[in-house]
Image (tube, coloured by chain):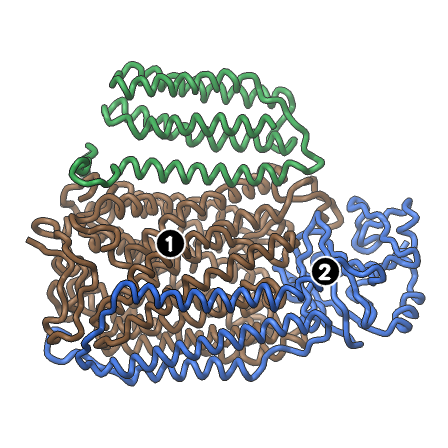
Chain colours: A brown, B blue, C green
Amino acid sequence: MAVEEHSAPTSFVQKYIFSQDHKVIGLQYIFTALFMAIVGGGLAVMIRTQITWPEKAMVTPEAYLSLVTMHGTIMVFFVVSLALVSGFGNFLIPLMIGARDMAYPLLNMLSYWTIVPACLLVLVSFVVEGGAAAAGWTAYPPLSALPEAVPGSGLGQTLWLLAMALFIVSFTMGGLNYIVTILNCRAKGMSLMRMPLTIWTYFMSSILGVLSFPPLTAAAIMLLLDRHGGTSFFLPDGLVFNNEVLAHEGGTPLLFQHLFWFLGHPEVYVLVLPGIGITFDLIATFARRPVFGYKTSVYALVVVGFLSMIVWGHHMYVTGMNPYVGEYFSVATVLITAPFAVLGMNLVASLWRSRIRMEVPMYWALGTVAVIGLGGFGGLFLATSISDIYFHDSFFVVGHFHLMIGVVTVLSIFAGLYHWFPKMFGRVMNARLGKLHFWLTYVPMVTLFFLMHLQGMSGLLRRYYDHSIYEFQKPGQELALAITLLTYTAFAAQGIFFWNFFRSMFSGEKVGENPWNATTVEWTTPSPAGHGNWPGALPVIDRHPYDYDPAAAEDKDYNPQGVVA
Amino acid sequence: MSESNSPPRNPRFGILFFVFGIAVVGTFALGWLPDVKSAHGHGIDGVIRYLLGTTGALFLLGCIVLGFFVMKYGRGEAQTRAIVSGKAQALWAVVPVLIMCAISEVGVLVMALPVFGEVYGEPPADAYHVEVVGKQFEWLVRYPGPDGVFGEVDHEKVHETRNPLGLVKSDPAALDDIVVRGKVHIPVDRMTVVHLRALDVIHSFTVPLFRVKQDTLPGYEAFTQFTATEAGTFELACAELCGLGHYRMQGSVIAESEESLQNWLNGQEPWL
Amino acid sequence: MTSSAVELPAHGADLRPRAGDIMCIVLLGVVAMLFAGFTAAYFIRRPSPDWVPIAIPSWSWLGTAALVVSSALLEGARRRQNRSLLGASILLGFVFLGSQVLSWNELSAAGVYLPSTPHGSFYFMLTAVHGVHLLCGLLALIYTAVRRAEIRWVAGYWHFMGLIWLYTLLLLAN
């Protein structure tokens, strides 16, 4: 049960605006993320258009750098984190552990309403003088510290820093809530090793997130002071702009990079782990058998989480960091492939001797497994410091991280939306449109980011406004048109999703409490679930979460995890 | 809805994964790396090919198994003996752990370590030294001149046209320094050590055909070293976002015979 | 709208730690990581030649004493359920913040401002960050006093802020 309880809301404002109900808050996050995704996707379309036809100069170099910076920032924090971690995390955690709500519903509400001004700051930054931040989502100083270095480093960068500060506060509030709720509010009988894997991933994600954001907060504060307080945390002696030497002295740009990547690396696991967790749950549900290797998957998740906090330097191999320190990071980073391979093997093995039902969510879940493999293996080329010398800052990096935090996550978000739609709105989404949406999203997105690996291998560099100046970039550039057309296709295809999503909300086929015959306890609540989730008593858990039997008759091949009196 | 008698089946969906695996591995196998013109560059390419071979094989295997499972078990037949003991599941987990630890650490500690020595080890005493300084948006190249010593610089003295590196006149070692914009002349078959600095923001010195990349940090002197194995002119680009002109910080590295290089150097006037 | 009384899960019935304990520990972990980040920055920045050390303002020592006594009184308040000790503790918290303002004045009177020397920059920044966290703690203490809520977790937070303060002074004094 919630540590602090809230009574049923009565007014419209209490129900839908300042709600303390985790389901409403989860949907608020998801809707906000869907809106920001249109913005972020639009930025991607503009980026691709510019670099495919640079001779047309459709945007200025200033605008281009803001496009790439804000595309990254918006997608990572305001789309993927917002939808997958904050949105689904909020919606699912109490439902899947048999609780009425999060431990601290008021804190939960505050966490959402802190994100809203952050989004506004991000959007407003596009129209201020100098434009939005333009130093990359990584915001390295001196470029990000000095307005004279690039126009976006004027007001735009300050607004970016303030937006990030609000984001971090919001995320921390949410992460604390998730941790307390998972540890403390599980239904009777739900030991940690009986939690669905989705919940394990949210647990790891929250711990990683709350512990790794603070050094970035420290860095952001120091960057703000360097920008506005005349300090020199990151700014060394002798910076020359327009024949003038700046007054700063003594600082170290590398310090910012260490602090940034201390967050930056765990952050990608904060994003990807819930995607992997959702994939496991969906595979069990639609393959009608228990997850293979539940226990080893839990251990693998913990190992991935631990390792992820001590390998950040692999983003900095060519920065001038001591190369022996770099070698340590390389040895440690490549070890992450071991637990990741366990997770991959378990995902595939969970299909062995199964009885697959190809409902719409299963298309997405199965597709995700293959992308985890492709993206995961690609990481090895970057983790090995010597090969990274060649690949650093090339399109190989861009392809790799998009596959992991832009495709695995996005596929999981869609999988989750199709799967839990009944629990959110009491109806199902149209299956035909769902499959069409799948093919028009999956094939283009996976292909285009895979092609970027080839571009990187041929030498194409990232964050370039125009690749045509160099001979060595010409072979890679030949793939640009194909990638851009695939981008347009994938972006346009989301129209199918939005149509299906909103239409089905109001006129989709109505379904009962457990349309998928699933075992986890969220499927013992009404569809949609109401205030307090279970109308009567909370469920009591008497078994592991995936008691499916692929040998039994098809309408009797599962035993729900929770017994509702 | 799947509550009724016939859940939806689509075993042919597994074909997607066969196609996926073969397409990925096949396209990579076409070969996308550009020519390599440096000694250690062959080592880097060797590491890349090792990783392509090992991960490619594993990825293809994974796709085939995944596709096979989807096709076989997508038919929806009842399955007995689907559940194995926890012990068996744990033992299976050992397999990917051993395979990945082996492949990945062989990559880092066996394939890559010798290259690490070439790139980061002590350069020989007869190495050729040149300095490259990144600034928005060009590369300033300094040759130490006959005395072989780089003279003192003072950023207070930097002026775009009159003294782009801020050479200090009172330092005798600076009087013979040669400063050139964008052209890095180096010898073939002798190690070149590049001293790297930056005047304003972080840049990154990269010569793709040499497999060289090293960030230039303001307030810090970095180094990179390599040996050109072929004469020619090779493109130099910036590989760290540095502002509006990041995409056009074009330079070139001219690798030539010792004689040709010496002739060129002799023909240059010192900056001061 | 919401019940403000904290409803505690049945503690003896199962072995789960109390929600407030988990919240407190993780929150303190977050604050610790923030100061860990600053610590790393401090040690990396320190060797630069432009590091001109400053003297710790004398007002900071008064503040330190106030904070230590405040923690002691708060512990007393917690163990003996004594609300007037709680009030005294809050008062001393304000004394601490006041002494920090005076410390900052002391420095600027001596010509040391935020950008003057990196040592000073760290002093201003770390004490400001600590001060903001302490102020939040102070507000939480006031809430606890007014609403007669459980002192346990606010006390844990307050003591930790005291420890962070001592740690910060130790760091800055070197």
**Distance from Cα at disc 1 to Cα at disc 2:** 38 Å
Q: Which chain is disc 2 placed on?
A: B
Is A31 displayed left or right of A515 in the figure? right
- Residue B107 got which mark? none
Q: Does residue B11 appear left or right of residue B177 in this picture?
A: left
**In-front residue for pair B176/A334:** A334
Residue A65 place in picture, x, y as percent: 56, 61
Provide the secondary structure element on which disc 2 rests. Answer: strand
The residue marked by circle 1 belongs to what chain? A
Q: Nearer the viewer, mark 1 or mark 2?
A: 1
How many numbered circles does the render carry? 2
Write down the residue under mark 1.
A302
Residue B101 placement (x, y as % from top left): 48, 64
**Between A417 and C9, the one nearer to me in the picture:** C9
Q: Say if A447 sits above or below A215 in the image.
A: below
Number of other residues with Cα within 10 Å of mark 2, as a class: few under 14, some 14 to 19, many 20 or more:
some
- In the visual, does B174 lie left or right of A420? right
Q: Which residue does the image show at 62% across and 65% down from the upper left? A: A386
Q: Residue at x 60, y 76 (%)?
A: A458
Is residue A446 shown left or right of residue A524? right
Q: Indicate the quadrant where residue B11 lies.
A: bottom left
In the image, C27 versus C136, the foreground residue is: C27
SS class, disc 1: helix
Task: Name the amino acid, label 2.
Answer: Thr
Residue A230 at least partly seen: yes
Q: Is residue A129 above or below residue C8?
A: below
Q: Residue lying farthest left? A: A565
Can you identify the residue that label 2 sits on? B224
Q: Residue at 61% across / 52% down in the picture?
A: A325
